[in-house]
Image: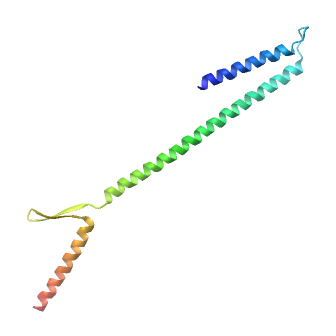
């Protein structure tokens, strides 16, 4: 797409140059130098404006790509954070007695179970002391 656009711009510039030169050539074949200079100056300005427009388009394209990159990075970070949470989330522990599976509990549930066990043990020690 860029090559045809540049080719079209070049062809229009060449066509303008031919028209300009043909209009300044007098009947006697002489060329008015100030008119040619003005036309060349106008053509340069037109070419500069075309280059500015191309630069604006490229800048807009780069800005859009940078925004997409930021969005993709954010999505990737969220995904990685989710994976980290999944790894550090509740895990399950099998409690066994003599090879028998007693209960399947989460790590948080295991802490609660350990606390209940300690409380029951203290209660048992207190009861033994009473007896």
Residue 57, placed above or below residue 87:
above
Residue 36 position, x and y percent, is 85, 20
Residue at image x 47%, y 48%?
73
Query: In the current view of this chain or complex, which residue is farthest to the bottom?
Result: 130
Which residue is drawn at the image coordinates 90% and 9% (left, top)? Answer: 27
Q: Is residue 127 left or right of residue 107?
A: left
Tell me the residue at 67%/21% (across/down): 8
Quadrant containing the N terminus in the rendered view: top right
| Residue 95 position by quadrant | bottom left
Residue at image position (45%, 49%) is 75
Q: Residue 80: x percent and y percent?
A: 39, 51
- State the image coordinates of residue 12 (x, y, percent, origin top left): 72, 20
Vertical side of 85 occupied by 47: above or below: above
Left or right: 55 with respect to 16? left
Q: Residue 66 falls in which quadrant of the image?
A: top right
Q: Is residue 68 above or below residue 35?
A: below
Which quarter of the rendering shows the C terminus?
Answer: bottom left
Image coordinates of residue 60 in percent, x first then y, are: 61, 39
Seen from the viewer's position, the closer of residues 8 and 89 is: 8
């Amino acid at each position: 797409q860029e090559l045809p656009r540049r080719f079209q711009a070049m062809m229009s510039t060449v066509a303008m140059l031919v028209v300009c030169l043909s209009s300044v050539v007098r009947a006697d074949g002489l060329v008015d130098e100030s008119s040619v200079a003005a036309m060349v100056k106008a053509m340069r300005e037109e070419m500069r404006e075309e280059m500015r427009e191309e630069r604006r388009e490229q800048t807009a394209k780069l800005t859009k790509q940078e925004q997409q990159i930021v969005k993709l990075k954010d999505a990737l970070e969220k995904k990685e954070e989710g994976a980290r949470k999944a790894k550090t989330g509740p895990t399950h522990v099998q409690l066994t007695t003599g090879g028998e599976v007693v209960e399947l509990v989460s790590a948080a549930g295991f802490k609660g179970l350990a606390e209940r066990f300690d409380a029951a043990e203290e209660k048992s020690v207190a009861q033994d002391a009473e007896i």
